[in-house]
Amino acid sequence: MHAYANPTRFLAIAKPLTPWLLGLGLLLVLGGAFAGLTMVPGEAKQGETARILYVHVPSAWLGMGGWTSLAVTGLVQLVWRHPLAGIAARAIAVPGMLFTALCLATGSIWGKPTWGTWWEWDGRMTSMLVLLFLYAGFIALTSGDEGQRQGGSLSRGAAIYALVGAINIPIINRSVVWWNSLHQGPSITLGGSSIDKALLWPLGLTVLGFSLLFGAIVLMRMRRIIADNRVAARLRRLADDEEN
Amino acid sequence: MTGVISGNGQWAYVAAAYILTALLTGIVLWTSWRAMAKAEKRSDALRAKNRRGDGQ
């Protein structure tokens, strides 16, 4: 893992990988969305609104997956002080918050024609809203802090915040089982799926596509932070040279 | 159908969800790409300037 602590070595992989993730991600998302809108039938009970599934489910998974990655990078930063862990955590926060917000918004849009309400303070929706606030808190905590000025590492407090916030992930996952909810129970589990195969396949495309786009956004944001670090280091060196 | 809105009225909600997703994802992708390209351009320019300075 420490082999990639060197930003130059990391960039040798990240630079060619970024356009591939971006291109393939866009292709899969567009293909999956097209299929979800035109090639599959409406769902028997919910009708056409079930097509929101193809953007809502990837958003939910990436919002939760983003925070899980944030907690892992926080742990790596705390235990091994890996120089790229803090940079990765900072890069994950914005796309993580984006997909959490999209999950809430598309879920709300789906809820109105299905349940007759935009919002309900039940376990699933409330815990997802808590995740959105957690992301906002992390971004506020790490924007313009000392770590950002010194190469992008996370402060001890921010790393612990990322770890503690991960408690919310299993709560979101189990909320529909633990509490009564308007939200349906788990449709896709390790044991299989309750969604008919005729409706399921475009979801595979959009989940993979949005995941690749998430990866592309993270790499782009990491590359920006590394480039900013290099500029700051060179400017410091120039200032030192002028002084001597 | 268990939904409270049925028929063609449902498509407006589907369209709203897809347009919002495309718009927000597009904005984050675009701003991330632009910020990265700008920062890397600045870094490369400064490195080239440093090299010219070292060569003199």
Image (cartoon, coloured by chain):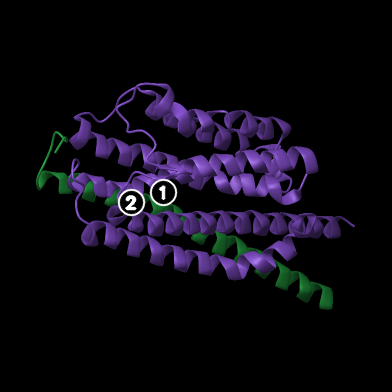
The x, y position of residue A24, in whole percent, is 46, 67
Name which residue lies at 75% across and 59% down: A4
Q: Residue furthest right?
A: A244
Q: Is mark 2 on a helix, strand or loop?
A: helix
Name which residue lies at 40% across and 39% down: A101
Q: In the image, is residue A220 above or below residue A27?
A: above
Residue picked out by circle 2: A54
C-alpha separation, residue under disc 2 versus residue under disc 1: 7 Å
Q: Is mark 1 on a helix, strand or loop?
A: helix
- Residue type, numbered disc 2: Tyr
Mark 2–mark 1 CB contact (< 8 Å):
yes
Residue A93, visible in the rendered structure: yes
Residue B56, visible in the rendered structure: no
> In which quadrant of the rendered image does the N terminus of chain A lie?
bottom right
The x, y position of residue A204, in whole percent, is 40, 56
Q: Chain A is drawn in which colour?
A: purple
Q: Residue A58 carries which label?
A: 1
> In which quadrant of the rendered image does the C terminus of chain A lie?
bottom right
Name which residue lies at 10% across and 48% down: B8
Q: In the image, is residue B45 above or below residue A171?
A: below
- Residue type, numbered disc 1: Pro
Q: Which corner quadrant of the image does residue A45 belong to?
A: top left
In this image, A45 relative to A62: left or right? left
- Chain letter for green, please: B
Mark 1: few/some/many CA within 10 Å (<14, 14-19, 20+) = many
